[in-house]
């Protein structure tokens, strides 16, 4: 199962939904694999997916736990949750310039996480590349940015 989630932001994340729709139209995902979308305020997707406008935190954890791949926004909360669930994932940061969020926290976090090998999709091409070759960062330690860190 593939889970696609836009988070709980009150603004739509239509850019991600458009990327996913494009991949669905081109039959990029396995035909027999269930795709569940937590679409929030958006929802421009074909009928080839199971759509949930909202999900509880408990349901989200369950979906993540059962997913083969998670494609989601780039917040600290979801990144931490994904790490505790040890799931393969791709993060797509919401952009304040596109009206997808209020501040630039997601873009800033993504710029930091990409240095640790976390799959960050900045474009549809990135999304395709990461889906085609999914991997989980093996040494990713979420948000360890202290000066005493011995990371290289």
Image: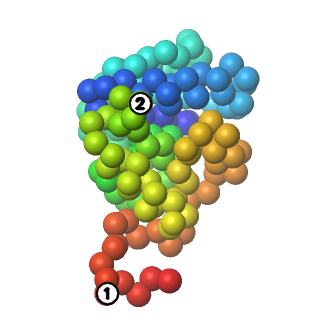
Q: Nearer the viewer, mark 1 or mark 2?
A: 2
> Is disc 2 surrounded by few (<14), some (14 to 19) or many (20+) residues within 10 Å?
few
Mark 1–mark 2 distance (CA, rounded to whole Å): 36 Å
Quadrant location, the N terminus: top right
In the depicted view, which residue is nearer to us: 21 or 51? Answer: 21
| Earlier residue among tags 1 and 2 | 2
Q: Which mark is residue 88?
A: none
Residue name at image x 61 percent, y 57 percent: 135
Q: Secondary structure at mark 2?
A: loop
In the depicted view, which residue is nearer to us: 61 or 136? Answer: 136
Q: Secondary structure at mark 1?
A: loop
Residue name at image x 40 percent, y 19 percent: 42
In the depicted view, which residue is nearer to us: 103 or 110? Answer: 103
Q: From where the camera sits, is residue 73 visible? A: yes
Residue name at image x 41 percent, y 70 percent: 141
Coordinates of residue 97 in the picture (x, y in percent): 39, 35
Coordinates of residue 53 in the picture (x, y in percent): 35, 20
Q: Which mark is residue 148?
A: 1
In the depicted structure, whether residue 26 falls above or below residue 132? above
Q: CB atoms at circles 1 and 2 under 8 Å apart? A: no
Total residue callouts: 2
In the depicted structure, whether residue 29 falls above or below residue 134? above
> Is disc 1 surrounded by few (<14), some (14 to 19) or many (20+) residues within 10 Å?
few
Coordinates of residue 15 in the picture (x, y in percent): 50, 28
Q: From where the camera sits, is residue 52 visible? A: no
In this image, 29 relative to 62: left or right? right
In the depicted structure, whether residue 117 falls above or below residue 22? below
């Amino acid at each position: 199962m593939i889970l696609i989630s836009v988070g709980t932001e009150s603004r739509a994340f239509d850019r991600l939904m458009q990327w996913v729709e494009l991949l669905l139209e081109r039959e990029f995902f396995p035909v027999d694999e269930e795709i569940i979308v937590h679409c929030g305020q958006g929802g421009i997707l074909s009928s080839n997916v199971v759509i949930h406008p909202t999900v509880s935190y408990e349901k989200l954890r369950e979906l993540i736990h059962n997913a083969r791949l998670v494609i989601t926004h780039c917040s600290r909360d979801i990144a931490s949750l994904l790490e505790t669930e040890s799931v393969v994932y791709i993060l797509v940061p919401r952009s304040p310039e596109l009206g997808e969020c209020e501040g630039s926290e997601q873009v800033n976090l993504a710029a930091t996480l990409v240095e640790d090998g976390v799959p960050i999709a900045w474009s549809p091409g990135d999304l395709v590349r990461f889906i085609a070759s999914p991997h989980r960062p093996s040494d990713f330690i979420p948000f360890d940015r202290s000066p005493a860190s011995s990371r290289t």
